[in-house]
Amino acid sequence: MKNIKYNLASDSWGSEEISAINDVINSNRYTMGPKVKKFENEFAAHFNSDYAIMVNSGSSANLLMIASLFYSKKYDLKEGDEVIVPAVSWSTTYYPVDQYGLKLVFVDVDRDTLNISPEEIKKAISPKTKVIFAVNLLGNPCNFDELINICKKNNIILIEDNCESLGAKYQDKFTGTCGVMGSFSFFFSHHLQTMEGGMILTDDKNLYELCVSLRAHGWIRDLPDDNSIEKKTGNSFYDSFNFVTPGYGIRPLEMSGAIGSVQLQKMPFFISNRKKNASIFKSLFENEPNISIQQETGMSSWFGFSLLLTNKLSTFRDDLVDILMANNIECRPIVAGNFTKNPVIKLLNYDICGELSVSDEIDKNGFFVGNDFRDLKNEIHYLHKLIKDFEKNVL
């Protein structure tokens, strides 16, 4: 088994993706165009959402979600308002919040699901709380019944960072569509791979139109004539260069859209195989006395497999990671661990509500290994054997 190499991710492309790229080359249209629009329409339809906006990354999707809420008259988001976030997530969940003058309020996560704790959210709500930015971590849905009830009771906006959880479901509803908006990522290690790329889903027409404008310089060129932001003159000379929002240059490539359409057709196969791998992983690790694994809420799409060392193994994380890496098993922290431990935190406007004890435990004792569309039975058994051998040696 020593020849086994267990990577964090693998290439899911075939000849169909190469053919899609060649179609773009033959069309001589490389910038965002009809193939991006086609993928947006297919993506929205697949996830039962009214609108989809493709961008160049999941990070940019998070940026546009915050920006569109900030500029929407409907949602009345302003500088100094508070956004509740889980302490365990990726950096670009947080940065857009700070960049728009909003205050991050970090709360702890649930030890079993690794997602934001509804009980900790309740403690953090203040008169300035305007948004809960829920993160579906490592493929696992949040408890949206509780989150939606909290938001309705307190008049709070719910948005989702769903970059790690494409294809996951909570009570037959896809994650990324449970809040007002949801973001997706198509980076190499994610469920769908389009080189670079991201998507936003929403049912709100005004937010959709704001995102379309913000995505491309803040102009109205790409908006329909009956849009809710700015009335068009009907004269393309003026309408092509009429700027209405402080926008960005974060459009996707036409190649990424073409690849996305191909990858979306393969998504059921990808997700199905990830779940098969998860069944093997759970059967081996769910009853280990010194290891805690992520507990599924709803139907996870299993981005990766987290392991939290507990009890007698709780002080051996770094030693175990060294052993696994030396034996060709790639490991990473559980996303970014407790993000408030990062040096960048001193540059952000933030507060911490309550103790981040679970996030600290994840930061010190947790790691994750990869999952993808391949049959990883041998790799997962190899992982289990190495951990059990390590456990015998140190305990």
Image (cartoon, rainbow, N blue to C red):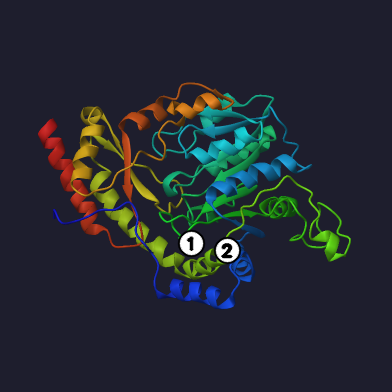
Quadrant of the rendered structure where residue 279 is? bottom left
Which quadrant holds the N terminus?
bottom left
Q: Amino acid at mark 1?
A: Thr
Residue under the point 50% across and 27% down:
345
| Residue 21 rendering spot, x and y as whole percentages | 49, 72
- Label 1 to label 2, Cα distance in Å? 13 Å
Left or right position of 285 against 268: left
Q: Residues within 10 Å of mark 2 (few under 14, many from 20)?
A: many
Looking at this view, is 237 or 10 the one in front?
237
Categorize mark 1 by other alpha carbons within 10 Å: few (<14), some (14-19), many (20+). many
Image coordinates for residue 241, horizontal then vertical, percent:
79, 57
Q: Quadrant of residue 252?
A: bottom right
Q: Secondary structure at mark 1?
A: loop
Q: Nearer the viewer, residue 47 or 148?
A: 47
Q: 183 and 46: which one is in front?
A: 183
Badge 1 or badge 2: first in the primary sequence:
2
Q: Mark 1 highlights which residue?
A: 194
Q: Left of 309 or right of it: where is 125?
A: right
Residue placed under numbered mark 2 in the picture:
43
> From what the image shows, is residue 195 above or below residue 170?
below
Q: Secondary structure at mark 2?
A: helix
Q: Three-letter amino acid code at disc 2?
A: Phe
Quarter of the figure with residue 374: bottom left
Q: Can see residue 105?
A: yes
Left of 293 or right of it: where is 298? right
